[in-house]
Amino acid sequence: MSEGDSEFDPEAAEEREIGREMVDQSTGLGSVAAHLYRGEVHRAVDWRGRLDTTTNWAVTVMSAIVAYAFSGDVSHAVILAGVIVGTAFLFIEARRFQDYDIWRSRVRVLQENLFANALDPSAGVERAAWRKELSDDYRNPSPKISYRGAFSHRLRRVYLPLITAMLIGWLFHLWAFTPDEPFPESAALPGIDGTVIAVAVGLYYLTLLVLAVPLTSKERGESGSADHGDLEQ
């Protein structure tokens, strides 16, 4: 008996065989898996569309606000209001990304452990207990990424560049429309000293930079190492 036979693991063998069974045997598993996978992909695409809609609205509204701010003698406070609006969209999109990630994670588990195994059973499966994890997730669905993680992901991918561009536009607006006043005095608003406004904006941007730092591999991307452990939380 070979060394591999002496270390035979029935559980691992069963997991490996599920891919071959789906292709080689008429058990109905292939049809069920195909419908399940198609449904999960549809829901992932649907939630991806909601994310894109939020992003499109954010870009459109923030661009319109900047365009209005430079259309004439308009207060620089309009641009700061646009930054606040962009932040509100960010909070909404982080929540939507959490929901999207539920379906995306299931699709990746099926791809890695079922369909990849069906194509090449000799390579085995990514996780031995993937069917149990997926079953538990169907019984008790829950987000696979924290709200902070989702917030960081969308901030880094979309909103930090947008808000950075708006704040650069804000500084340019101060320079172009109040050339006779030095910064930060030019940032003053009625009843609020310019230094206070400048410090508040600086602290706000510094907070965004801190929140944009990913704390886990999953927060860094949507595939590869970020997908391992999706259903284990």
Image (tube, helix red, strand yellow):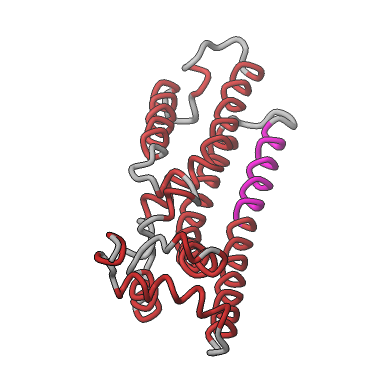
Residue at 62% over, 65% down: 45
Residue 104, placed above or below residue 85: below
Residue at 59% over, 61% down: 48
Q: List x then y, in percent, for residue 163.
A: 54, 36
- Farthest residue to the front: give it: 1
Q: List x then y, in percent, for residue 42.
A: 61, 72
Magenta region, main secondary structure: helix
Residue at 61% over, 16% down: 175
**Residue 233 in view:** no
Q: List x then y, in percent, for residue 143.
A: 38, 65
Instruction: Specify whether 19 is left or right of 211.
Output: right
Instruction: Specify whether 23 is left or right of 196.
Output: right
- Farthest residue to the right: give it: 71
Residue at 38% over, 37% down: 213
How many discs mark residues in the rendered view? 0
Q: Is residue 62 magenta?
A: yes
Please identify the quadrant where the C terminus is shown.
bottom left
Specify the segment rendered in magenta: 54-69
Residue 29, placed above or below residue 76: below
Please identify the quadrant where the N terminus is shown.
bottom left
Q: List x then y, in percent, for residue 106.
A: 47, 68
Q: Is residue 29 magenta?
A: no
Residue nearest the viewer, comparing 2 with 56: 2
- Farthest residue to the left: give it: 6
Q: Quadrant of residue 118?
A: bottom right
